[in-house]
Amino acid sequence: MGAIRLRFWSVSIAALACLVFAQHGLAQQSKLGTVDFPTSGRPEAQSYFLRGLAALHSFWYEEALDNFRLATKADPDFMMGYWGEAMAYNHPLWAEQDTEAARKVVAKIHDTPRLTARERGYLKAVRALYGEGDKLTRDKAYCRVMAEVHRDYPDDMEADCFYALSLLGTVRPGDKGFSRQMQAGALALEVYRKNPDHPGAAHYVIHSFDDPEHAILALPAARRYAEIAPAAAHATHMPAHIFLQLGMWPEAANSNESAWKVSDAWVKSKNLSLSLRDYHSYHWLTYVYLQQGRYRQAEDLLTALSKMVTESWANGRMSHSYESMAAALVVETERWDQAPKLFKADAKGQPDASSGGAHMHSAADAHADAHADAHSASPYQAGGDRLGLYVLGLAAAETGSTTAGEYSERLHGMGKQASTGADAYGAKVAELMALEIDAESAAARSDYDSAIAAMDKALTIENEMSPPSGPPEITKPPRELYGEIQLRAGHAKLAEALFSSSLEREPNRARSLLGLARAAAKAGDAETAATTYSSFVKMWAQADPECAELKEAHTYLQQAGAH
């Protein structure tokens, strides 16, 4: 037994960091947390394996792949090295997978005398992950095998973590209940209790409780995760999931600023394409700035990305971030005339957004005008994309343009088409977007009965969807829009209830908070109005001083004698 034990190696990442990465000149940027995973690999392979494992737990797949390949290069018969490489091709929480590449790696795995029973359990699991059936079928099969490994090795914290992640990997948009998330969260919390420096434990706690009702449970892990693995951009971004769920905008801004800087430094240190930077955090940072009234900074981010996108439009991560940021900028600032500049309609006989009108609900500052030319040069074409159609349609509806109906009709059609295929969830998104355009168009005509009927349908659909995780999937949250429509219809009390409900789903969201204050004031609820306007002013401590919304809040508080 003693002779066999000498073959296994368990090494702390923190203890090995300087030794392993002095060769690569990354000693100061190598911190990814502490993991403990005994294997039958040789010592020179094990050090790379542990680095890859720690990176894998923070979804730093590029770094994980590099190190698992170095592990098998150092020890070609190291089967767990191939396991790690195959695992790095799976992105469980996004239901993404490079199945072909992973199966080529799995084919290299074979039985050797060195393998332990525990290692064979992990190898059985990865074979299930890339076995037969569609992605969800294989995710469930993998989860079942990881449940066995977790059961057979109760002291194995890695089994706890990967089983927790496998449970989260079976969740799909629109699934009801939180049982799998709660089970995963319990597993991850126990590992976090035993090893507060484990990157996977903190990470999976955050993902497990990433919804409005449970986010508070992950706040301690969120506050710590960036300290555990500061070298990974995703680790510095992830706390923002919980900060955003709780409406903690300064903390959310800091997380995403840090994540962007870390990813930028990594790309430059490796001399990689700038398109590999963390544009996900860049998008989130824009949304957070908008919630703080920092419109100029948000617009600066979009302008900079617009230039990058023009040079590298084919990159999916950049283009998705661009359209999400552009949509948020238009909706949050209510600069509806910017929509046609940011989302050009296509040239295939589709509606021309330029006919949507140029009236703005709130004054655009001089900074916005200075960037208009850069926006108008955007290469983005909205013709076949539901988000672009939605923003153009909503802008047309807000400005009273008759073209709104054309955008709505296309979205209704996309919803019907998707509902007959595999994208039932996407069908709900498209239909909800169309209903919001319909409702706003009716409200613009003062047809509030039709607007309210459309929003009732929209809320029914939203209630069937997953709770928000990050910036709202429907850029203008339905309850917020419904509250604004009810307020314009003269139903202040109903509006007040809708804004309160919106804030329960997305705490401290600026437009919902402002709507609640306005509705309370109209309803004669002076105490709620003053309290809410005060909260809004504090939240917008870093806002552009010329913002009309900030002046509105200050004016009300001065007239009410509030402080």
Image (tube, rainbow, N blue to C red):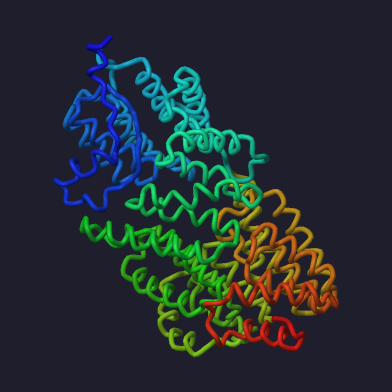
Q: Is residue 293 above or below residue 81?
A: below
In this view, the residue farthest toward the top is 1
Image quarter hosting the N terminus: top left
Image quarter hosting the C terminus: bottom right
Q: Is residue 63 above or below residue 511?
A: above
Residue at the (41%, 30%) spot, across then down: 158
Which one is in front, 279 or 533?
A: 533
Q: Is residue 26 found left or right of 387 in the rendered image?
A: left
Where is residue 58 drawn, in percent x and y?
A: 39, 45
Q: How many marks?
A: 0
Which one is in front, 372 or 47?
A: 47
Q: Is residue 351 above or below residue 237?
A: below
Q: For residue 513, what is the image quadrant?
A: bottom right
Where is residue 127 drawn, in percent x and y?
A: 39, 25
Where is residue 240 drawn, in percent x and y?
A: 50, 57
In this view, the residue farthest toward the left is 23
Q: For residue 46, what is the image quadrant?
A: top left
Q: Is residue 521 above or below residue 164?
A: below
Residue at the (46%, 33%) spot, across then down: 194
Which one is in front, 501 or 231?
A: 231
